[in-house]
Amino acid sequence: GTLGNPTVYKITPPGYSRRKIEFFYDPAKVLRLEMTSANISKWTNVSLPNLQWLNLSFNDFAVIPEFRSDGTAAKQGFDGGAGLAPKLDRLYITANDLGRGNDSLLGEGDRENTGNSSQQCNRLPLTLKYLIANGCFSDNSNIDLEDYENLLYLDAGSSYTRELHRPQ
């Protein structure tokens, strides 16, 4: 497939079944992934260097993976970063309870905690153009996206609530 017309593999049934999803394909050739309602809670440690489009909506993530490779501990809560998707320009992550990640992202010692939602969003690469993250955060801190000069569209409305749940 292509970015505009991807190959589709269905994961059934969607919902709350715990599962491990593996596929074997050259990571450099993966341009787009859409894995919604698959109850995924952890991301791969394999870099997808050319991934541009990612839809992880309605899963079980508590922390946005370290898609960026140039983070600083003060702002992103980690040094460097894993660079899991350094060219990502579109992320859909609606209805993942990222508010649970606050304990993982708190500053330690001389590290500054810029707020859960801000640290989470700053784990994304600066190539990001579209971020759709409705119903993900439960804190009321400001989100610092000052460095995201390419960002064209941000939709981060509503807090994570029981009404905003993953389809069963």
Image (spheres, grey):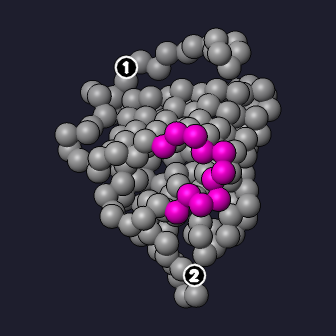
Q: Nearer the viewer, mark 2 or mark 1?
A: 2
> Which of the 4 quarters of the picture holds residue 96?
top left
Mark count: 2
The residue at the point 76 percent across, 35 percent down is 50
Mark 1, residues whose alpha carbon is within 10 Å: few (<14), some, or many (≥20)?
few
From the image, tell me which residue sits under label 1.
Answer: 13
Classify residue 29 by image quadrant.
Answer: top right
Check the image and name the residue furthest to the left.
Answer: 163
Q: Which residues are magenta?
A: 144-154
Task: Say whether residue 82 is visible.
Answer: no
Q: Looking at the rendered structure, which numbered label has been put on residue 111?
A: 2
Residue at the spot x=49%, y=36% of the render?
92
Question: How many residues crowd mark 2 within 10 Å: few (<14), some (14–19), many (20+)?
Answer: some
Q: CA distance from mark 2 to mark 1?
A: 42 Å
Q: Residue at x 48, y 55 (%)?
A: 63
Q: Position of residue 2 (x, y in %)?
A: 71, 15
Q: Would you say the magenta stretch is mainly helix, strand or loop? A: loop
Q: Amino acid at mark 1?
A: Pro
**In the figure, is residue 37 to the left or right of 71?**
left
Residue 98's spot in the image, x, y percent?
40, 53
Quarter where residue 7 is shown = top right
Q: Nearer the viewer, residue 130 or 119?
A: 130
Amino acid type of the residue tagged 2 in the rendering: Arg
In the image, residue 106 sits, relative to residue 127, either above or below, namely: below
In the picture, the quarter occupied by the C terminus is: top left
SS state under label 2: loop
Q: Position of residue 157 (x, y in %)?
A: 34, 45
Q: Secondary structure at mark 1?
A: loop
In the figure, 111 relative to 80: above or below?
below
Residue 145 lies in the magenta-colored region: yes
Residue 151 lies within the magenta run: yes
Residue at position x 36%, y 54% in the image = 137
